Amino acid sequence: MLDAQGSDAPLTICPNGNPGTECSHCKVRALSVCSALEGDELQALDKITRHVSFSKHETLFAQGDLSDAVYNITSGSVRLVKLLPDGRRQIVGFALPGDFLGLSMSERNGFSAEALSATATCMFARKDFSALLDSKPHLLRRLHAMASHELSLAQDQMVILGRRTAEEKVAAFLLGLRKRWARIDGSTVRAPLPMSRQDIGDFLGLTVETVSRMMTKLARDKVIVIVPDGVRLLDPARLEALAET
Amino acid sequence: MLDAQGSDAPLTICPNGNPGTECSHCKVRALSVCSALEGDELQALDKITRHVSFSKHETLFAQGDLSDAVYNITSGSVRLVKLLPDGRRQIVGFALPGDFLGLSMSERNGFSAEALSATATCMFARKDFSALLDSKPHLLRRLHAMASHELSLAQDQMVILGRRTAEEKVAAFLLGLRKRWARIDGSTVRAPLPMSRQDIGDFLGLTVETVSRMMTKLARDKVIVIVPDGVRLLDPARLEALAET
DNA sequence: CACCCTTGTTGATCTGGGTGAACGCGCGGA
DNA sequence: TCCGCGCGTTCACCCAGATCAACAAGGGTG
């Protein structure tokens, strides 16, 4: 079996959409902000939670809009898109299960968030969440830790965008994504790719064609195998060498 | 007078190096984390502060080292450098007075911090600062707000690195820097450049030669004037058009 | 089932910015 | 004072990756 996790068959980690569901059963809790809470506190969180699902290509929120909610992704995947006036696109990140959207705490959204596949979220009104932060300092610390981590990933991405070749970019991308999936589903060689080649290009500062060519090259060199909806890493060590980590 | 702020004559906003100095007199307080504190709290901060100065090209801390201190820049400027194994360099940011280094809260430094000019800092042992954060939730909120802002700047930088032309990069860089100086010294057309062309190139994902070419082009087009240690913006509106903001 | 429309791949060609080299200026140290 | 060296600038040339173009493989729809 070479197939990777399909984009239309998202991980159904959490039984979202069920209003009665409690955070205490949530499988991504350990990965997300919520890990800072337990017992009563978790109940307080549950109380302000709305379980909201989005279908493929649906927009969670749009660049420039007032940011009145924050989200915890429980299953599926989301692309974070910045659009230039002339249509050029830069993707500043992909959100996977356990990721939190709305760290920024700014008045307006700096980017749009668009579901890549069917995606389930825990949604919080910003004012409710902010009030909870005021009463739970360790939740704030956890949030700050996540923001710090995010910042550090963004700085790594700057190196990739500014100083790496096309091949290095694609290799680093695949390794980074595999690592993130590993935290979620424990798989060590599969890297599901719910996003299109165009999305990967807009994330890495490349064109679709170049992404395609580099993927083909890596496959020809037996470093990866391209499978439906993703890749399989045949030789992670060589991939790491290519990424010049 | 066309001269900009020289890199060897840093803003002497805060009388650092004087052990007796109190935060309450610090001119960058409003810009920095410290604005979250007042009265007794400020005294508590003062108590754990060490005033440390660095001369030009001195290293505040190095990539990969254990991160045991955090810094508040009170005067001067600092470059934040990520180095690849093969010597390629990416600068992930420049710290100016009021900026805070050590948001990341991670075990080891993701980058080196090197003084671009004589630089004065308030330095805190990480454990002291962390303890203060535990007792002052609003300081933590302020820190988180700064980290969020930093993250948002990093995402803007991703767009610049991934999707902009050389000319747009340089234009956006000058505008961004001018805006940051404006918060510090209120100047609206001067943009001191304490960093070298090489540093600018490593920040924008360009070579020195290209930076130089673009600066010359902007000067020839009467959009900027190049002066000792910086530039003066002649036509900020046109610069903004060039940056495709 | 036939159609079309989106997505991925591959090939040929072009170009923005990188590469390598030379040169001038200003500054610091002998 | 003079020399050496780092830094910025300019020029000629080149190449990695963009652009333009064609085509194949689904897969959703009437």
Image (cartoon, coloured by chain):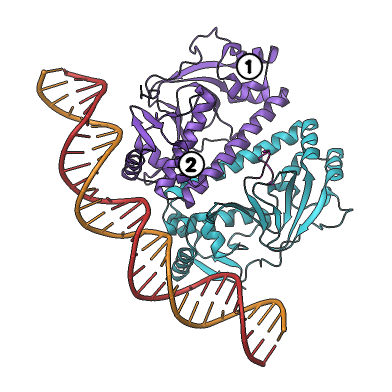
Chain colours: A purple, B cyan, C orange, D red
- The residue lying at 88 percent from left, 54 percent from top is B19
**Residue A184 appearing in the image:** yes
The residue closer to the viewer here, B180 or B60, is B60
Give the labeled residue for mark 2: A240
**Which element carries disc 2, helix, strand or loop?**
helix
Q: Quadrant of residue B185?
A: bottom right
User: Which x, y percent locates residue D19?
Assistant: 28, 51
Q: Residues within 10 Å of mark 1 (few under 14, many from 20)?
A: some
Q: Secondary structure at mark 1?
A: helix
Q: Which residues are magenta?
A: B101-109
Residue B57 is covered by the magenta coloring: no
Between B223 and A143, the one nearer to me in the picture: A143
Residue B130: x %, y % from top left: 77, 36
Dot 2 falls on which chain?
Answer: A
Residue at the image position 36 percent from the left and 24 percent from the top: A3
Amino acid type, callout 1: Leu
Q: Position of residue A190 (x, y in %)?
A: 43, 28
Could you tell me what secondary structure mostly forms the magenta stretch? loop
Q: Which residue is mark 1?
A: A45
For the residue pair B77 and B198, the one nearer the viewer reads as: B198
Q: How many angstroms separate mark 1 from mark 2 (CA)? A: 40 Å
**Residue B122 as seen in the image, left or right of residue A49:** right
Say which chain tag 1 marks: A
- The residue at the point 51 percent across, 23 percent down is A186
Give left or right: position of B57 versus A229: right
Q: Residue at the location (79% across, 45% down)? A: B124
Amino acid residing under circle 2:
Glu
